Image: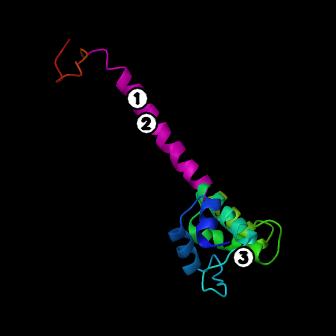
């Protein structure tokens, strides 16, 4: 298939496909007419890249999965290098979850304190700090 058909079937643009080609993620095969030529395997590569990017993987992190598919494996995550990327991503997500949990706790404490003004002070109006 030609680049326009592949882009349409993959739900992306021809520009994106050319970029992936320049990064070595998509093969650069040309037919006898000089046009880029793709097959169903290339569509599978693109779907793997797209799925991983939807999960938050950057483009370079998709490379081991693409290489695994190119090596003939049925799934991009059936190779040790792909599993290593999964492990790193899980570690990264766990760290982010920890940071977000700490931020949430801080905000909850501040909200609780702001919701209940000290008993010895009159409440202030939200509009200009005037007493009610």
SS at mark 3? helix
Nearer to us: label 1 or label 3: 3
Q: Which residues are magenta?
A: 92-120
Q: Are marks 1 and 2 in contact (CB under 8 Å)?
A: yes
Vertical placement of residue 20 versus 7, above or below: below
Vertical placement of residue 89 versus 69, above or below: above
Q: Is residue 10 in view from this perspective?
A: yes
**107 or 128: nearer the viewer:** 128
* Distance of label 1 from label 3 (alpha carbons): 49 Å
Which numbered dot is residue 67?
3
Vertical placement of residue 57 versus 114, above or below: below
Q: Quadrant of residue 37?
A: bottom right
Q: Residue furthest front?
A: 33
Image point (68%, 75%), residue name: 38
Circle 1 is placed at which residue position? 111
Image point (63%, 82%), residue name: 28
Where is residue 43 drawn, in percent x and y?
Answer: 70, 66
**110 or 16: nearer the viewer:** 16
């Amino acid at each position: 298939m030609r680049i326009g058909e592949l882009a349409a079937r993959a739900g992306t643009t021809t520009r994106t496909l050319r970029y992936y080609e320049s990064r070595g993620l998509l093969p650069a095969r040309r037919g006898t007419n000089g046009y880029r030529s793709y097959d169903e395997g290339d569509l599978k590569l693109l779907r793997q890249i797209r799925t991983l990017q939807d999960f938050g993987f950057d483009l370079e992190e998709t490379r081991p999965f693409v290489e695994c598919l190119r090596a003939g494996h049925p799934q991009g995550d059936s190779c040790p290098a792909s599993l290593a990327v999964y492990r790193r991503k899980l570690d990264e997500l766990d760290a982010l979850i920890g940071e977000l949990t700490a931020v949430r706790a801080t905000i909850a404490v501040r909200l609780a304190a702001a919701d209940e003004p000290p008993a010895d002070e009159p409440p202030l109006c939200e509009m200009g700090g005037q007493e009610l």
